[in-house]
Image: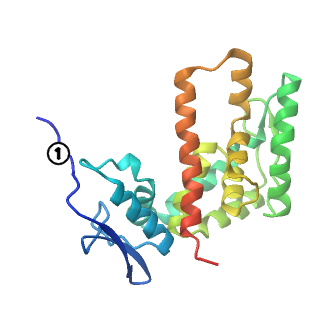
């Protein structure tokens, strides 16, 4: 027996004020999250983006084409109720941050990593007050406890919507520092940060060629990384 698939049942999706934020109405009825919570978003811009996703649906619903709605659902149903656990999960990336794992050879890759990642370490030290130590080889390099505490505090200070985006930025890049740099807008354009997270993979492609399947996966991850930054922008209150 085939599984049930939700289909479009509404004529129009609109935005309305709701409590301290905004929600999406489907023919006047408010959207609910999968856990049946109120779908209240922090800004009109985010609500308008979500409404546009609902309006774009035709026939069967395609959640994969509704990234703002999916991220908002995650923020409300999961991150908000497990804030401390999610923050701790994200902060743990600082203990083995991608940009602290340096190749021992060849010299060109070593130089490329240093050129791309050293400025990020400088930013973490000067802007965040969290110096980290780069190491060589596959073994993790122990990081200063004070720095990890500072980074963890910055992560924990984010609200549910920012934390949802930060989780994806960090998990997709493998770097807490890159995720925080994306959060703070420290490197522009955002595509540059994604490229910095892919230095090792780019090097391998240059040596051995591009694997089509791996390239497809990488393209999807890049799209999700950029979408996470967009979600942050939508969550920010208007200036």
Residue lying farthest to the top in this orientation: 208
- Residue 126 position in % (x across, y down): 86, 62
Residue 115 drawn at (x, y percent): 86, 40
Q: Position of residue 224 (x, y in %)?
A: 53, 46
Q: Going 62% across and 51% down the picture, which residue do you hit? A: 92
- Position of the C terminus, as image quadrant, is bottom right
Q: Is 238 situated left or right of 145 in this image?
A: left
Image height check: is 216 above or below 57? Answer: above
Residue 189 visible in the picture: yes
Above or below, 44 against 126 in this view is below
Closest to the observer, 66 or 194: 66
Q: Nearer the viewer, residue 158 or 218?
A: 218
Identify the residue at the far front of this view.
Answer: 11
Of all residues, the one furthest to the left in this rendering is 1
- Density class for disc 1 (Cα within 10 Å; few <14, some 14-19, many ≥20) is few
Q: Which residue is pictured at 77% across the width and 61% down the height?
A: 146
For label 1, the SS is: loop
Left or right: residue 164 versus residue 134 is left
**Quadrant, the N terminus:** top left
Query: What residue is at 29 percent from the left and 60 percent from the top?
Result: 34
The residue where tag 1 is placed is 4
């Amino acid at each position: 027996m085939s599984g049930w698939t939700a289909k479009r049942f509404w004529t129009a999706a609109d935005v309305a004020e709701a409590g301290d934020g905004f929600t999406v109405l489907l023919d006047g009825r408010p959207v609910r999250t999968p856990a049946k919570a109120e779908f209240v978003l922090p800004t009109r811009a985010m609500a308008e983006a979500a409404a546009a996703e609902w309006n774009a649906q035709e026939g069967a619903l395609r959640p994969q084409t509704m990234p703002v709605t999916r991220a908002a659902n995650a923020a409300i149903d999961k991150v908000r109720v497990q804030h401390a656990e999610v923050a701790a999960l994200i902060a743990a990336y600082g203990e083995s941050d991608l940009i602290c794992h340096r190749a021992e050879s060849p010299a060109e890759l070593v130089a490329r990593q240093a050129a791309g990642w050293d400025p990020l370490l400088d930013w973490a030290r000067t802007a965040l007050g969290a110096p980290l130590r780069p190491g060589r080889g596959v073994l993790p390099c122990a990081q200063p406890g004070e720095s990890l505490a500072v980074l963890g505090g910055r992560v924990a200070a984010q609200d549910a919507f920012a934390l949802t985006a930060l989780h994806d930025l960090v998990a997709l890049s493998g770097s807490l520092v890159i995720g925080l740099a994306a959060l703070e807008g420290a490197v522009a354009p955002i595509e540059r940060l994604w490229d910095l997270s892919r230095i090792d993979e780019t090097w391998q492609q240059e040596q051995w060629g591009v694997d089509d399947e791996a390239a497809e996966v990488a393209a999807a991850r890049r799209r999700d990384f950029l979408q996470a930054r967009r979600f942050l922008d939508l969550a920010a209150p208007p200036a």
